[in-house]
Image: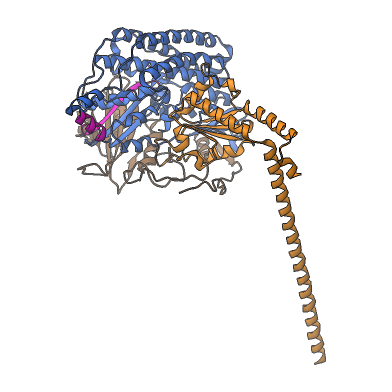
Chain colours: A orange, B brown, C blue
Amino acid sequence: MTDEAQKPSIITSSLDFLVNWGRTNSLWPFPYGTACCAIEFMSTEVGRYDLSRIGSEYVRFTPRQSDVLLVAGTITYKQAPILKRIYEQMAEPRWVIAMGACACSGGFYDCYCTVPGIDHIIPVDVYIGGCPSRPEAFFDAMFDLQKKIKDESYMKQRAGRVRDQLEMIKAKTAEAKAAAKDFAQEKVELAKEFVSEKEQELVKKAQFWKE
Amino acid sequence: MDFKELMEKFGGKLDAQAKWDDCVVVSREYLHNVVAFLKDDPSCKMDMLVDIAGVDYLTYPNHEGPRFAISYAFKSLKHPGLRLRLKVLVSESDLKVPTISDLYANANWYEREVFDQFGIVFTGHPDLRRLLNHVEFVGHPLRKDYPAQKRQWLSTNDYLLPELEKRLEALGYWIVKRSKEVETKDNEFLEGSVKE
Amino acid sequence: MIVRDSNGETLDLMPLNVGPSHPATHGCLRFMAAMDGETIVASVEEIGYLHRGFEKMVERGTWQQVVPYTDRLNYCSAIMNNIAFCRAVESMFGVELPERCKVLRVIVNELSRINDHFVCVAAAFQDLGGTTPFMYAFNPREEIMCIWEKLTGARLTNSYARIGGLSRDAYDGFEQDVLAALDSTEKALKDLHACLDRNRIFLDRTVGIGKISAEKAISYGWTGPCLRACGVAADLRKDEPYYDYETYDWEVVVGTQGDCNDRLQVRLAEIEESVKIVRQALKRLTPGPVDIVDPRIRVPAHKLAYQDMEGLIGRFKSVYEGVRVPEGEFYSGSECANGELGFTIVSDGSGHPYRIKVRPPCLTQFAAFHELVEGGQLADSMAVLSGLNIIAGELDR
């Protein structure tokens, strides 16, 4: 089954296309805006730049309903656990954009309190430079991300996941079998010991009575 | 106005470092009284505390005297344009200064910040915690001997429930039963991401 | 948690954490509230989520290298912070600026103030659930951003001011651009007032919410529009005038109630006053130099560095060693969009700042947050938060 799913066929490639088309054109961002870059993101949202042209105007402030985690601004050590937890709360598929120099590398805050790039905490798909990044750069990053999503194969990922699961099940079964075997062996040994102990006791008793 | 009365009454002296504004150095024993006097005296009426800034003179060239100083900036709304700074010198062996958070409400957070950054203890402060750095931070970053790039990771979130209980008690509530404690020490939280 | 109040009644309170990734807390504020149903009984705040070490970083560079860091304090009106810092250092030097520099600084100051107040009002509406005013407010803001791009080369973090002058003179056609931006500002103001003044939902959610008395606000050290909304006419531009602010014809806007609606209305009225000041300042804009001529304070122009030896040496020394600010300590406050932005500066006479402490206007306002929300509904706390206009960059530095 897994081998068949890996081969590109008409059904799977069209399904890939359909899924990617849907994902590409409705990327809902979660703006994790902390600093200056968040203000530029606000400019990206409104009139002149208008993020809704690429279907991403629907900003969700809950990690459970969004696809793209947009980290806009400096992340400090005090904030790092929160960012990590939010990333973990997001459902697959999820992508991360690091917006601005601070999110990419810590920027010019080379200091005791700033994380030198959010890739120390979470994986990042697209980096945007600039301090803060211009709205045009943000659009460019979104296009990059869309290209990246188009190259992804939903069926391949699914097949990979199924294969992983199968392997996991196999491994678990083998583990369980081994455990059961060990358990049985232990039991047998215990029984043998018990029998031998009883025998010895009987022997002792017999000797005692003889005496 | 000139601050002659202030100097006579409380033994303050003009700071030689302040060349562009008025600054009076007072000893910390008199600090609380001086501030109370400034706040109520009709000729100055310093009704707003503008800023509290700590200074570490460790690497200051040709500096003599105690290592730390705290500079309090006041201004008056009754007499627009009237400003005064007070300076208290704190030696490293005895890092204690009386609090003025009972006189000015915003001194609370300012003093917490100075405690956080310099480690100066304000005696009588109702809630002396770190303000800007996280709970697991060790050391005081704005001291001159703290390396600027010495990073310290935080493994968990700050926990605010005890402070909330304190605030409730201050408002006149009596806590009968605590809320169920949430496990804060989550060891797998940053596993794999801590890098030196 | 179960508590007993002073009357002996037992209450079952729920601790509720809000922030720091809550949409209305702008990523960096956190408060924990004890809730009785929908009512906040007690609240405690926590800050420091954007503590980027401004005060440690500036000790490592020269005096001129502080200017880009000040951009990122209140990033909604970056130029104002530059000017406030440069003003503090210039008064330590004791120099007088050329007339054109002063007028240009007044113009960019007031345009920044317009920008900042628009962001505050727009974000407040957004947090209360209105999207349209957000679009109205951002139109003139984008126009002003275009002026910044032409004038300084950057949209948001401009670094326009320099110690002893400005980074460059105004470009050709600056006056026309500013006038056009002012026109669209006035149009947007009209639209905003149409959305706001008689909007039943908006008024119900902001009038009488988050009230504070003037005495308490002063004790908390409030400054700027939030203090003026409580009815105290305190404005550093009038009280301790600089850049000839006292010679312009404008009024200090004062509120009456000290509630959330007043804070937003004061900001909108201040935009009108700023428009007035800019219009007058544009008339005073006469040709002349924008920098003072002193190679020890202001870096000599590029042209001079290529032409004669003195200019080259001046530029080299000024860039590598930094300007040498006279030894001493000084506190200087300027009226910024949120209130008094102060710098306590300690200089040891070298090219590097020994210590710079920022006095952020937001910190004092957020310190009083629990006084404003206790006894109100949870949804009101969002209105209060957006009315205070907390900018995390200067709150945590």
Quarter of the image for residue C377 reads: top right
Quarter of the image for residue C356 reads: top left
Instruction: Please state if C6 lies on the left or on the right of B14 as rendered.
Output: right
Q: Residue at x 58, y 28 (%)?
A: A29
Q: Residue at x 63, y 35 (%)?
A: A152
Residue A37, given in percent of the width and then of the height, sits at: 47, 28
Please say whether residue C201 is visible from this viewpoint.
yes
Which segment is the magenta one? C312-337
Residue C80, given in percent of the width and then of the height, sits at: 36, 22
Q: Residue at x 69, y 47 (%)?
A: A164
Quarter of the image for residue C230 reads: top left
Q: Is residue C282 placed above or below C224 in the rendered structure? A: above
| Towards the viewer: B15 or C37 | B15
Instruction: Please state if B115 lies on the left or on the right of C134 as rendered.
Output: left
Residue C318 colored in magenta in the image: yes
| Towards the viewer: C394 or A60 | A60
Residue A126, given in percent of the width and then of the height, sits at: 53, 34
Residue A172 colored in magenta in the image: no
Residue A82, given in percent of the width and then of the height, sits at: 54, 38
**Quadrant in which the C terminus of chain C appears:** top left
The total number of labels drawn is 0
Instruction: Please state if C96 lies on the left or on the right of A85 as rendered.
Output: left
**Quadrant in which the N terminus of chain C appears:** top right
| Towards the viewer: B186 or A106 | A106
Instruction: Please state if B170 lies on the left or on the right of B148 as rendered.
Output: right
Please say whether residue B75 is visible from this viewpoint.
no
